[in-house]
Image (tube, rainbow, N blue to C red):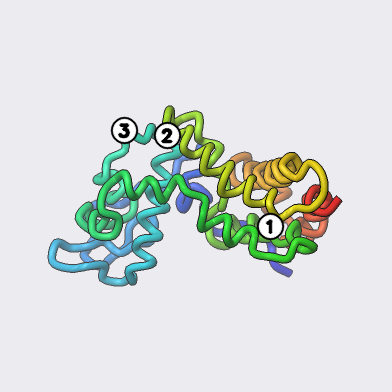
Amino acid sequence: MRSAKSSTSFERSTGESVEASTALSVGEPEGTTGATGAAVVTDSGGPSRRDAEATKAAILRAARHLLARHAHADITLKAVAERAGVSPPLIMKYFGNKETLFARVMSFEEDAAVLLDAPLADLGRHMVRHVLVSQSERGADPLLRIVFAPLQGTQGDTLRANFRTQVSDRLALRLDGPDAGLRAELAVGMLLGLGVMYGIARGGELRTAPLDDVVRRYAPAVQAHLTP
C-alpha cells in the first residue's frame, strides 16, 4: 500500500515550508545538478541534462521557494538562478523578466485545473489525494503558497485575488444548492489544513500513514461540503 511519507523535502520543491532547505552547491562541475535538480548551465549552451520543460519547472520551484522567505521586491533573478541551478540568461529566455516569472508563481490557474479535474461526486477524494500525492511524491503543494501572502505586501494582495478567483470561486461554480461560495471556501480550507499539517507542521503520524487510509478518512469530510 502506498504511503504518504515523503522522500523529497517539502521545502526543496515549493518553498512553502518555513524550514531551511539544502543549500545550493556552488562551483559544481559542468553538467551536474543544483539543489532543485535542474542541470547547471554553461555560457555556451542550454541545460545539459534536462529538457526545457523540466528546467522551467525547476525555475518556478526555485522562485516559489524564495517567495516563501523573502519579499518579492528583494528577490533577484540571480538568486532564483542560483537556487534552480541555471544561469540568469536562461530565466530571461524562458520567462522574459522577473515580473513575468513571478506572475506565473503567483497564479493558481494551472494547479487549480488539475486539482478540480474530477466529477463532482468524486471531487473530494480526488482533491485530497492530489494534495497528498503532490507533497509525498513530487514535493509540491498546489495551494499552500497562499499561506505566505502576508509576507508579500501588495504582491500578497495579488496572491489572494488569484487564489479567490482561480480556486475558491472556480470551485463554487461547480457546486449546486445554497451557499456554494461558503461551501467551496470550507472545502478549500480543509485542503489547506491538510497541506499545512503535512508540509509545514510535518505531522509524524500523517506523513507515515498509508496514503489510501488518509484519503479514506479525510475525503468524506471534504465531500460533505461539495455535495451536502
For the residues labelled 3 and 2, the Cα–Cα distance comes to 12 Å
For disc 3, the marked residue is 74
Amino acid type for the residue under numbered disc 3: Asp
Among all residues in the image, which is located at the extreme left?
44
Residue 203 visible within the image: no
For the residues labelled 3 and 1, the Cα–Cα distance comes to 34 Å
Residue 117 visible within the image: yes
Marks 3, 2: nearer the viewer: 2
Classify mark 2: residues with Cα within 10 Å, few (<14), some (14-19) or many (20+): some
| Among numbered discs 3 and 2, the one appearing first in the sequence | 3
Q: Which residue is drawn at 73% across and 65% down?
A: 119
| Among numbered discs 1 and 2, the one appearing first in the sequence | 1
Q: Which residue is drawn at 56% across and 37% down?
A: 147
For disc 1, the marked residue is 127
Q: Is residue 114 left or right of residue 203?
A: left
- Element on which disc 1 rests: helix
For disc 2, the marked residue is 155
